[in-house]
Image (cartoon, rainbow, N blue to C red):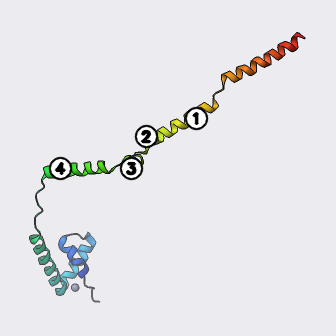
Amino acid sequence: MKDVHVDDLLVDHVRGDLDVAERDRVGAHLAVCAECRATRERFAALLTELARTVPAPPPIHWGAYRAELRERLARRRGQAGPVWRWLVQPAPALVAAALVVALVVAACRAPRPARASRIRSRSTTRSWRAGST
Ligand SMILES: [Zn+2]
C-alpha cells in the first residue's frame, strides 16, 4: 500500500508547528519518499530566504507616538458634543431622571395638611353641635 504524500504538512514540519503524532507521520513518510523530501528542502530554503529578506521594523519613537495619541484623544474629545456625551455617559442622565420621578411620586403621595385639617375641624364642629343638642 502506497502512503499518501504529505505536501500540505511540509511547511508546518519545517517550522516545527506539528504535534508529535503528525511530526512522526511526516518523518516516517519523508524517510521513504524522495519527492516529499525534495519538496521539504525547497520549502525550508524558501522560508529561510523569506526570513532573511523581511525588512526590520522601524524603531519606535515613543515621543512621536505619545504626541499622536494626545492629538487623537483631543480630537475625539472635541468631536463629542453634549448630546453624544449624554449617550456615552448615561449614568448622570439616569440619576437625574430617577430623582425627578422620586420627587414627583413623593409630592403626589404626601398628605395635604391644610385640606386635612379643614375637613377634621368641620367634622369636629358637626359632632360637637350634634352632641350639644
Ligand atoms: Zn511523498
Circles 4 and 2: CB atoms closer than 8 Å: no
Q: Return the disc, 4 or 2, that comes first in the chain's sequence.
A: 4
Q: Is 94 or 23 nearer to us in this picture? A: 94
Q: Residues within 10 Å of mark 4 (few under 14, many from 20)?
A: few
**Quick check: 9 above or below 131?**
below
Q: CA distance from mark 1 to mark 3?
A: 28 Å
Q: Residues within 10 Å of mark 3 (few under 14, many from 20)?
A: few
SS for dot 1: helix
Q: CA distance from mark 4 to mark 1?
A: 50 Å
* Residue underneath mark 3: 84
Q: Return the disc, 4 or 3, that comes first in the chain's sequence.
A: 4
Circles 1 and 3: CB atoms closer than 8 Å: no
Residue shown at 12% from the left, 53% from the top: 61
Q: CA distance from mark 3 to mark 2?
A: 13 Å
SS for dot 4: helix
Q: CA distance from mark 4 to mark 2?
A: 32 Å
Amino acid type indicated by mark 2: Pro
Residue 93 at x, y percent in the picture: 45, 42
Numbered circle sitting on residue 104:
1
